Image (spheres, rainbow, N blue to C red):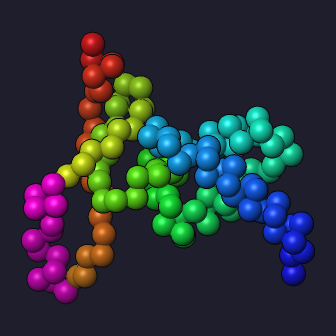
Amino acid sequence: MANSRGQSRNTKQLELIWRAVKDDSSHPTADQIYDRVRKKLSHISLGTVYRNLQKLVSDDKLQVLMLGRAQHFDPLVERHQHFICESCDRVFDVMVDRQREIKPAKLPHEGFKVTSHQLAFYGVCKHCSA
């Protein structure tokens, strides 16, 4: 059982990790967040960062975006899509009108129950195409 000092440390680490990602629209990876947090808390481990990021996901403060084999963390948890630049690999949020949301026509009729989906647009961002 954690003592009050241990609980305080965990809360401090969680708060520091949350502050490192909460206003970040760049969709950072755990490694990128770890690099930021280590500048303020040098002894923190990558495992601690991963565990706290997963806690933030389970608390619905972050969502996970899988790009290839890498997890990217997104503080915008309302339903939205993404645009991925094939030139610089930056990820941009794309808000989709709920009335125009893409829904599979065939799956429900074949007995599948769709609970969520992810859609990503790929191309070249305005910075790279300029």
What residue do we see at 50% from left, 61% from top?
A: 61
- Tell me the quarter of the picture where residue 15 sits: bottom right
Q: Where does the image place residue 50, in percent across and percent down from the top left?
A: 67, 57
Q: Which residues are magenta?
A: 97-111
Q: Where does the image place residue 80, in percent across and percent down from the top left?
A: 29, 54
What residue do we see at 53% from left, 48% from top?
A: 22
Q: Taking the image as drawn, is residue 104 in sight?
A: yes
Quadrant containing the N terminus in the rendered view: bottom right
* Residue nearest the observer in this picture, 24 or 34: 24
Q: Is residue 26 above or below residue 111?
A: above
Quadrant containing the C terminus in the rendered view: top left
Find out whether residue 109 is within the magenta segment. yes
- Tell me the quarter of the picture where residue 5 sits: bottom right
Q: Taking the image as drawn, is residue 69 in sight?
A: no
Q: Where does the image place residue 116, in percent across and percent down from the top left?
A: 30, 69
Residue furthest to the top in view is 130
* Residue nearest the observer in this picture, 5 or 59: 5
What residue do we see at 24% from left, 49% from top?
A: 95
Query: In the drawing, does residue 51 fall left or right of residue 103?
Result: right
What residue do we see at 19% from left, 86% from top?
A: 111
Query: In the drawing, does residue 130 fall left or right of residue 38?
Result: left
Q: Where does the image place residue 19, in percent across and percent down from the top left?
A: 61, 47
- Tell me the quarter of the picture where residue 38 sits: top right
Find out whether residue 7 is within the magenta segment. no
Magenta stretch, main secondary structure, is: loop
* Residue nearest the observer in this picture, 107 or 48: 48
Q: Is residue 115 above or below residue 67?
A: below
Query: How many discs appear?
Result: 0
